[in-house]
Amino acid sequence: MKKIITTVLACFLIAGCSSTPKTENASCSYTQEGLMTATYDLKAENNEITVLSLKMIYDKAMFGNIDFATITEEEKAQMIDAILSQSGISEDMKGVKTTVEIQDTIIATIEMNLKEADPDTLKNLGFDFSVL
């Protein structure tokens, strides 16, 4: 998945470059086996990607068709921790905001402000912008 993200970002950067400074937005999404949909939103200013947002929607079929309304707050917290730790994201990362909502589906959103985020942290997450 990290290679896919890096490739997508490189394509958007190359396709979006122009000679005049401006703000641009780009978005793409894909669905994996009908169980998870990922949407990437990118914001660029002056031909540099400044914000990357990743929104993942998990179908409850991934979790055995659990009725999320019946699970406890403690169980929800454990699921949120598992989702974030699996992605390598922690809530205390500079320039990275996360939200996870559990309703009929699980919606995890990760927003990275590339001006504020630590480059080494981004690299560890699979976002190496130094090669672009």
Image (spheres, helix red, strand yellow):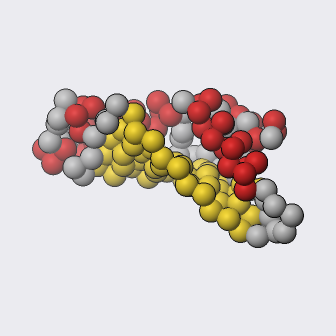
Q: Position of residue 100 (x, y in %)?
A: 39, 49
Q: Position of residue 112 (x, y in %)?
A: 61, 51
Q: Position of residue 17 (x, y in %)?
A: 79, 56
Left or right: 38 as drawn, with respect to 114: left
- Which residue is drawn at the image coordinates 69% and 44% (left, top)? 11
Left or right: 92 as drawn, with respect to 63: right
- Which residue is drawn at the image coordinates 62% and 29% (left, top)? 3
Picture layout, residue 60 above or below residue 45:
above
- Regarding residue 88, the answer to whether it shows in the image is yes
Task: Examine the image and state in which quarter residue 59 appears.
Answer: top left
Q: Nearer the viewer, residue 12 or 109?
A: 12
Q: Nearer the viewer, residue 11 or 121?
A: 11
Which quadrant would the C terminus be assigned to in this image?
A: top right
- Regarding residue 116, the answer to whether it shows in the image is no
Q: Nearer the viewer, residue 10 or 72?
A: 10
Q: Position of residue 125 (x, y in %)?
A: 62, 34
So how many labels did they put on this image? 0
Which quadrant would the N terminus be assigned to in this image?
A: top right
Task: Examine the image and state in which quarter residue 21 appears.
Answer: bottom right
- Which residue is drawn at the image coordinates 50% and 34% (left, top)? 87
- Which residue is drawn at the image coordinates 31% and 36% (left, top)? 34
Q: Nearer the viewer, residue 14 or 2?
A: 14
